[in-house]
Image (cartoon, grey):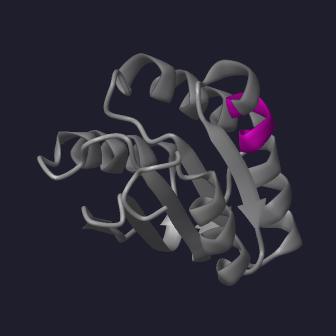
Amino acid sequence: MPITWDIDETAKLVTVRVVGPLTLDGARQALKELYAEPSYRPPMVDLWDLRDAEIDRGPGDVEAFVRFIQVSRGDRGTNQTALVVSSMAEFGISRMYQAYAEVSLPISVRTFTRIEEAYAWLEREMPPGEPGA
């Protein structure tokens, strides 16, 4: 499960791309590594490009991932997260994550099927006066 990311410090944007199967353990490990990146400094926004991912998670995995983020993010997490998916099944799973995150995390999460809409939302959501706004 290749998970790669690009951190644009000027735009305060993290773009994460997942290709292939996305497992709970793989997502946890990738997030730990991302949080440890020296250039990953809030406030930031992130876009998870899941269009080429194979998401096979149930509600228990989604809830467990949100709990993991609650415990491990500290002050390293982003302010807004956009998820971009390619199928209705992945859209449903991503919306489930969005629902859990909305009540458990101090971030805004939205799910999209078009990457252009995700970037536009992130741009609008960037706090005023921040780079990339």
Would you place residue 80 above or below residue 115 in this image?
above
Magenta stretch, overall SS: helix
The residue nearer to you, when weighing 74 against 71, is 74
Whether residue 6 sits left or right of residue 100 in the image: it is left
- Residue 79's spot in the image, x, y percent? 51, 40
Is residue 34 rendered magenta in the image? Answer: no
Q: Residue at x 75, y 21 (%)?
A: 103
Q: What residue occupies the far left of the structure in this picture?
A: 38
User: Quick check: can you spot residue 60?
Assistant: no
Quadrant in the picture for residue 76: top left
- Residue 17's spot in the image, x, y percent? 44, 72
- Residue 82's spot in the image, x, y percent? 62, 58
Q: Residue at x 16, y 48 (%)?
A: 37
Q: Which residues are magenta?
A: 97-101
The quadrant the N terminus occupies is bottom left
The residue nearer to you, when weighing 108 against 26, is 108
Quadrant in the picture for residue 2: bottom left
Is residue 99 rendered magenta in the image? Answer: yes
User: Quick check: can you spot residue 92?
Assistant: yes
- Residue 84's spot in the image, x, y percent? 66, 69
Q: What residue occupies the far front of the structure in this picture?
A: 129
Whether residue 38 sits left or right of residue 16 in the image: it is left
